[in-house]
Amino acid sequence: MSKVIRVKYENGVLKPLEPLDLEEGEVLLVSIKKPVRKLFGILKRRNPRVKPEDVERVIEEAEIEGPL
């Protein structure tokens, strides 16, 4: 089974933001991707003046406001 989920990192622990159908003690392979880097690359190609901190700020504001 392969699934992409969102997690929150708190106090050294990755916490899923949705329920998982897993057995207790099950071992998983985790790939960590930061969406800011990917989004920054896309925006940078469209506008060379875009700065990483601008992209992070927009993402943080969107997380506070919640999904559309």
Image: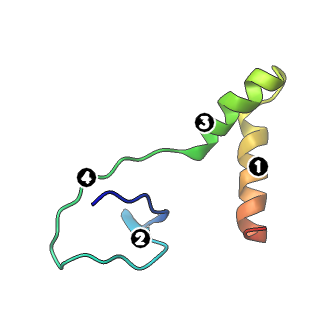
Q: Residue 18 vs residue 46: left or right?
A: left
Residue occupied by mark 4: 29
User: Quick one: label 1, few (<14), some, or many (20+) residues within 10 Å?
Assistant: few
Q: Is residue 20 above or below residue 59?
A: below
**In the image, what residue type sits under mark 4?**
Leu
Q: Is residue 45 above or below residue 54?
A: above
Q: Residue 7 vs residue 55: left or right?
A: left
Residue occupied by mark 1: 57
Tag nearer the camera, 4 or 1: 4
* Residue sitting at x 70%, y 64%: 63
Q: Distance between the residues labelled 4 and 2?
A: 15 Å
**In the image, what residue type sits under mark 3?**
Lys
**In the image, what residue type sits under mark 1?**
Arg
User: Quick one: label 3, few (<14), some, or many (20+) residues within 10 Å?
Assistant: few
Label 4: which secondary element: loop
Tag nearer the camera, 2 or 3: 3
Q: Distance between the residues labelled 1 and 3?
A: 15 Å
Quarter-of-image position of residue 21 = bottom left
Which x, y percent locates residue 60?
Answer: 72, 57
Tag nearer the camera, 1 or 3: 3
* Residue sitting at x 78%, y 59%: 61
* Residue sitting at x 15%, y 73%: 25
Which x, y percent locates residue 36?
Answer: 63, 42
Label 3: which secondary element: helix
The one nearer the camera, 53 or 31, is 31
Dot 2 or dot 1: first in sequence order is: 2
Dot 4 or dot 1: first in sequence order is: 4
Residue occupied by mark 3: 38
**In the image, what residue type sits under mark 2?**
Lys
* Residue sitting at x 49%, y 63%: 6
Which x, y percent locates residue 2?
Answer: 32, 57
Residue occupied by mark 2: 15
